[in-house]
Image (cartoon, rainbow, N blue to C red):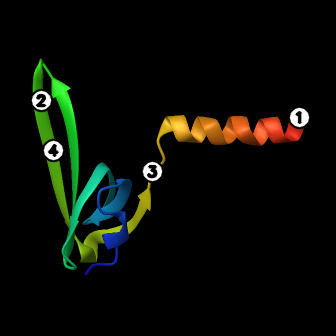
Amino acid sequence: MGRHSSLVGKRVEAHYRTGDIQLVAAGTLVSDSGRSIVIEERFSQGGKDKTLRVEIPYEYVIRVVELKDAISQSFEVISAYSKKLS
């Protein structure tokens, strides 16, 4: 059981380091083994479906945050604005 197991199956953004460089990977967290996490992103390019998988060892992970989709963020903004008008 890993630190980020509660986020498995959810859309996440992972910040990690490789040497002196900090990188970001976004996608669906597909596994958390307790030693590393795997993030997967599916997309179409040139009419073909492709999958990009990134495995990040725990010692390189800086932080992992859940991403909310644009639609739910929009509803939250609209809801907050309508409460102000009431």
Is residue 83 placed above or below 62 in the rendered structure? Answer: above
For label 4, count other residues whose C-alpha is less than 10 Å away and answer few (under 14), some (14-19) or many (20+): few
Q: Earlier in the sequence, mark 3 or mark 4?
A: 4
Where disc 1 sits, the SS reads helix
Q: Earlier in the sequence, mark 4 or mark 1?
A: 4
Q: Rounded to the nearest whole Å, what is the CA distance between mark 4 and mark 1?
A: 44 Å
Q: Rounded to the nearest whole Å, what is the CA distance between mark 2 and mark 3?
A: 23 Å
**Which residue appears at 35% of the width and 55% of the height?**
10
Q: Which residue is mark 4?
A: 52
Judge from the rendering whether residue 84 lies leftward or rightward of residue 43; answer left or right: right
Q: Earlier in the sequence, mark 2 or mark 1?
A: 2
Amino acid at pointer 2: Asp
Mark 3 or 4: the one toward you: 3
Q: Which residue is mark 1?
A: 85
For label 3, count other residues whose C-alpha is less than 10 Å away and answer few (under 14), some (14-19) or many (20+): some
Q: Which residue is mark 2?
A: 49
Is residue 20 visible in the rendered image? The answer is no
Mark 4 or 1: the one toward you: 1
CB atoms at circles 3 and 1 under 8 Å apart? Answer: no
Q: Rounded to the nearest whole Å, what is the CA distance between mark 3 and mark 1?
A: 28 Å
Q: Which residue is mark 3?
A: 67
Judge from the rendering whether residue 67 lies leftward or rightward of residue 55; answer left or right: right
Mark 4 or 2: the one toward you: 2
Please identify the quadrant where the C terminus is shown.
Answer: top right
